[in-house]
Amino acid sequence: MSADTSKMHLVVLALAAGNHSAGWRMPGALAGSQNFTLLKHLIETAERGKFDLFFLADAVNSSPSMPPSMMLRLEPITLLTALAGCTKHIGLAATASTTYSEPYNLARLFASLDHLSGGRAAWNVVAGAFPEAAGNFGREAHPSLDERYGRAAEFIEVMKGLWDSWEEDSFVMDQASGRYVDPAKMHPLNHRGEYFSVTGPLNITRPPQGYPVIMQAGGSEPGRDLAAATGEVIYSVAPTLQVGKEFRDDIRRRAEKFGRNPDHIKIMAGVCAIVGETEADARKKLAALGDLVDSATALKTLSDKLGHDLSGYDLDSPMPDLPPGGPMQGHAKAILAMAREKGLTIREVRDATTATSHRLLVGTPEQIADGMEEWLEAGVGDGYAVLPPWFPGPFDDFVDEVVPILQKRGLFRTEYTGTTLRDHLGLPWPEHPARLAAQLSAAE
C-alpha cells in the first residue's frame, strides 16, 4: 500500500548524548540526559519544526558499558512534565517497562502527564530490554521472552481499564447540591488475571485523549504481535527499503488478524541524518564520528544488538548466519538482513552500524529530503523517527534546513492544526466503554 505523503509524521528520539555512541565527543556537541537546558532547547526546536512527538527512551538500570545516553538520566515522565510547561503543541513520549513497573502507579503517572499537557502524552511500551535490571527489583533472573510479553499484554489491558475508571463528565463539583462527583459514572476495574490483580478505580479522571497514545517497537515474534494488537505508533528498524516494507506489511497483516484497522497504526522508520553544505562535507562529519569510536566498544555494541558475542570471530570474514537473539531482536533481524543483502563482513557491519542500526542518510538538505520522500512514497511507513547523531548541531540543521524542504514539497505540515497528540497523528479518540455500551443498547 502506498503511503500518503501528505501526512508525513516526524518524531525525534532525544538521547541527549546523541544517537551515535561517539556523538557527544564531536566539536560543539552538548550532552547530558540530566541537562535540562539542553533538553529544553531540543524540545523547543522540535516544536518549532512542527514535529509530532518528542520521545525519551529509558531503562531501569545503569552500567559503564551502556550507551552514554542511557547510562545516567532523569526519570522521563517527571522530565516530560517539566517540559510540558515549555511547549504548547508537541507530543510527549516516555518509555516505561511493563516488566519492572505496576499498572496502577504507571496509569496514574501517564494520566497526570496527559492532563497537565492538555492531551499530549504517549507511552512507549517495553517489555524490558536489559536483563541487568532484574536485580534492581528483587528478581533473581530476567523473565523469559514469552512471559515478558504475556505480562505486557495484560499490563496494557489493565492500564486502559484504569484510565476508564471515570467517565469524562463524572467530575461535577455541584456546589448547590454538595455533589462533588457522580458516583454512577465511576467504574471500578476488579481485574483478576494471570499476572495482575487490580481493584481500582484510579484516583484521577479519564485522560484528555481517552488513553495516552500507545507506542511500541516490537521486533521479535511476540513483540510484533503485541505491537500489531495494541500499538498506535510503531518504530521500525529499517536499514534497507526492503526490510522496512516487509516490516510494515507484516504489522498491517497482523493488525487485521487482531480485528484492528491497520490505518490506525502509524509506522515510523528510524533515520539518522547527517546534513552538510555539500555531500563531501556531510561525509567528512561521518568520518569524524568514526574516528572517535573505540573499535572494541563498537564490536561490543554490535554483539549486544545481535545477541551473540562476536569477539572470537575474524572481523574480515563474512557475517555468519546467526539466529536473532538477545532482547533487541528487531535490531538483530534488520542488521543481519542488511549484511546478507550487501554481502558485508563483520568489520563492515560493525562500522556501518556504529552510526546507527537504522537508515543512515548523509548529504545536503535536498539529498536528505529526497531520501525521506523516496522511502515514504515506496511504502516504508507513515513517517520517521529522527535520530540525530549528536546534539544540538545536527538536529538544528535538520529542523532549519531539511524540514522547510519537506514543507515546500507539501510532505509535512507547516502548522499544527489540532491540540492533542491524537490530532497530530490522525488517530481515533477511544470512546469510553460505558458510553459504547449505552450506544449499543440504545441502537437495539
Image (spheres, helix red, strand yellow):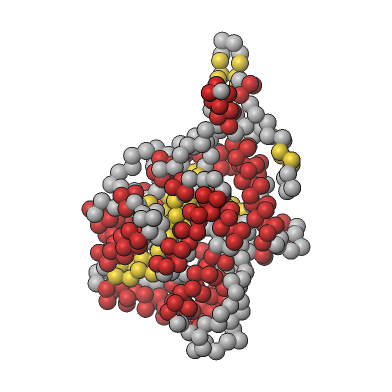
Measured from the top left, where is residue 169 in percent x and y? 54, 24
Write the residue at 33% across / 39% down. Answer: 417
Looking at this view, is 64 or 370 the one in front?
A: 370
Residue lying at 53% horizontally and 70% vertically, measured from the top left: 333
Q: Nearer the viewer, residue 245 or 56?
A: 245
Q: Quadrant of the N terminus?
A: bottom left
Name of the residue lying farthest toward the top: 176
Q: Nearer the viewer, residue 432 or 197?
A: 432
Residue 199, horizontal then vertical, whole percent: 72, 35
Q: Quadrant of residue 193?
A: top right
Furthest residue in direction front, as rendered: 444
Q: Where residue 141 sits: x, y (%)?
A: 74, 63
Q: Which quadrant holds the C terminus? A: top right
Between residue 92 and residue 256, name the one nearer to us: 256
What number of labels is visible? 0
Please indicate, yes or no, whether residue 358 appears anywhere in the rendered image: no
Which residue is found at the position 56% from the left and 27% from the top?
440
Visible in this render: residue 307?
A: yes
The answer to whether 373 is drawn above or below residue 294 in the figure is above
For residue 396, side relative to residue 290 (left or right): left
Quarter location, residue 389 = bottom left
Above or below, comparing residue 389 to residue 409 in the picture:
below
The picture places residue 152, in percent across and down from the top left corner, at: 64, 51
Q: Is residue 52 left or right of residue 299?
A: left
Residue 62, quarter of the rendered image: bottom right
Residue at the image position 51 percent from the left and 49 percent from the top:
256
Residue 222 located left or right of residue 400: right
